[in-house]
Each structure stands twice: as C-alpha cells, then as structure tokens.
Amino acid sequence: MKRLTAKEEEIMGFFWKEGPMFVKQLLPFYSEPRPHFNTLSTIVRGLEEKGFLAHKAYGNTYEYYPVISEDEFKKGTLRAVIDKYFNKSVLGAVSSLVEEEEISIDELNDLIRQVKKGKSSI
C-alpha cells in the first residue's frame, strides 16, 4: 500500500467520515485561512492516482469517494511499519511494546485470550 502524506491522510479522514464528496465540500472542514480550492483539488487527484479515491463525473465536476476503507489503510500502514522497522516480525513489534511497558502483562494475556477465541479486536 502506498504511503500518504499528513495532508493526504487528513483529507482521506474526511472522506472516510463523510463519504462521497465534491472537492468544494472539503473547504468547510478547515478553519481560516482555508487552503485554496486548487490545492485541495490537486491533493484529491493525487489520492485518486494512488488508488485511494475514485470519482463519478457529473458534467465537468467530479464527486470523489474512497475505494480503500480506513480499516484497510490502518492494517496496511501497520504492516509497513512492522516490515520496515521490525524485520517483518509481528512478534518483534509486540516484544518491543512489552519491553517499553506500552503493553502490560495483563493486556498481553487478554490479547492472547482474544486470539485463542478468534475475536481479536486489533
């Protein structure tokens, strides 16, 4: 999965929350000074080129919609981090979090129980 810039991820968040939109509908999500319409349009078209958005044409204007869910994006991003920083080892990533005490033993045991039940919420 391709990586997104912070601005691209922000815009995708609007699409994931709101659903299909025209570029002009993004403007109210920003406080003053708002980004220029052309700037948003360029970013949205880039997201389409990367495969995150698609569009439906209405004459000369386009309504964009997400083609990758937020959950798919999160999983792909997590996989990329694990691959890059933990030599593709999920165990290495979890071990690192346990070592740093980001995950307690109780939380780890709860995770093991969830995985055994097949109901992991990760």
Image: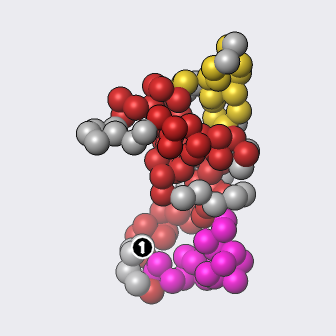
Quickly name the residue at label 1. Answer: 103
* Residue 35, above or below 75: above
**Where is residue 1, by image quadrant?**
bottom right
Picture residue at 36% right of the left edge, 34% below the top: 29
Picture residue at 52% right of the left edge, 63% below the top: 111
Q: Is residue 90 visible?
A: no
Q: Main secondary structure of the magenta part?
A: helix
Picture residue at 43% right of the left edge, 39% below the top: 36
Residue type of the residue flagged with mark 1: Ile
* Residue 82, above or below 120: below
Q: Secondary structure at mark 1?
A: loop
Q: Is residue 94 magenta?
A: yes
Report the number of numbered marks: 1
Q: Is residue 8 visible?
A: yes
- Quadrant of the drawing holding the C terminus: bottom right
Label 1 neighbourhood size at 10 Å, few (<14), some (14-19), many (20+)?
some
Q: Which residues are magenta?
A: 79-98
**Where is residue 3, by image quadrant?**
bottom right
Residue 54 left/right relative to 81: right
Residue 28 left/right relative to 50: left
Residue 91 horizontal/vertical position (percent)? 63, 78
